[in-house]
Amino acid sequence: MKIMFSMFWLPSLVVVPMITMRLLAEEKRAGTLEMLMTAPVTDFEVVFAKYLGAVTLYTIMWALTGFYVLILQRFSVGSTLDLGPIFSGYLGVIVIGQFFIAIGLLASSMTNNQIAAALMSFAVVFLLLIVLNWLTYLFPSGVMGKVFHAISSFDQMEDFQRGIVDIRPLVLYASGTALALFIATRVVESRKWR
C-alpha cells in the first residue's frame, strides 16, 4: 500500500487534467453554458456541481483500488493489516486530488478550448507537484526549505501514508480548493459583463 500511495502523483498529473478539461470549456465552446445559466441555479451552484461530479469520478477511481486492500487482508498469512495508515493514505489522496480538480476546473473556466484547459491544468499541477518537490531538495534547510517542505504534496503524503493526519495540510488544501472554486465562479460570472 505504501508503494501505491507513493505513486499518487501520477494520476494527479495525468488523470486530473483529463477529467477536468471539458467541465466548463466544452460548455462554452458548444454554447450550452448560456442555456445552463438560464436554469434557476446560481453560477456557484453550476461550478460546484461540475466540481462534485469530477471529485466523485476521482474518488470512485481510487475506491476501486480498495479491492487491493481486501485481497491483502484476505490472503495475509499470520498478520493483520493496520487499516489506520491505509485509511489516512486514502484520505490524503482524496484531499490532494480534490485540490487539483479545483485547479483543473479553474483552468477549464478560463478558456473555451478543452486542450488548452488540459495543458493549463497539467502545467499548474506539474508546478505544484514536481517543481515544489525539486525545490525541497534544492533548499533542504532554512526558511525557504521550511516553506517548501510545508507545502510539498510529497512530504504531506508521506505523513498520510504513515497514518499521521495533520490538520495543516487539510486546511491548506481546503482553503486552496475554496479559492480556486471562488475564482472559477467569478470567471463564469464575468461572462455577464462582456
Image (cartoon, grey):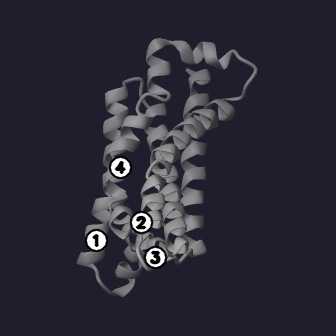
Q: Is residue 193 above or below residue 108?
A: above
Dot 4 or dot 3: first in sequence order is 4
User: In front of the other: label 1 or label 2?
Assistant: 2
Amino acid carrying label 1: it is Leu
Residue highlighted by disc 2: 75
Q: In the image, which disc is placed on residue 11?
A: 4
Q: Residue drawn at (38%, 51%), measured in percent from left and top?
A: 12
Q: Is mark 3 on a helix, strand or loop?
A: helix
Give percent across and percent down for residue 53: 57, 35
Q: What element carries label 4?
A: helix
Dot 2 or dot 3: first in sequence order is 2
Q: Is mark 1 on a helix, strand or loop?
A: helix
* Callout 4 touching callout 1 (CB < 8 Å): no
Q: In this view, does 175 lie above or below 144?
A: above
Name the side, left or right, on which 147 lies relative to 63.
Answer: left
Amino acid carrying label 2: it is Phe
Q: Is mark 2 on a helix, strand or loop?
A: helix
* Callout 1 touching callout 2 (CB < 8 Å): no
| Cα separation between marks 2 and 3 | 27 Å
| Cα separation between marks 4 and 3 | 19 Å
Give percent across and percent down for residue 1: 39, 66
Q: In this view, does 82 lie above or below 7?
A: below
Give percent across and percent down for residue 166: 57, 76
Q: In the image, which disc is placed on residue 159?
A: 3
Q: In the image, which disc is placed on residue 135?
A: 1
| Cα separation between marks 4 and 2 | 27 Å
Corner quadrant of residue 41: top right
In front: 133, or 94? Answer: 94
Give percent across and percent down for residue 186: 59, 36
Name the side, left or right, on which 54 lies relative to 112.
Answer: right
Amino acid carrying label 3: it is Asp
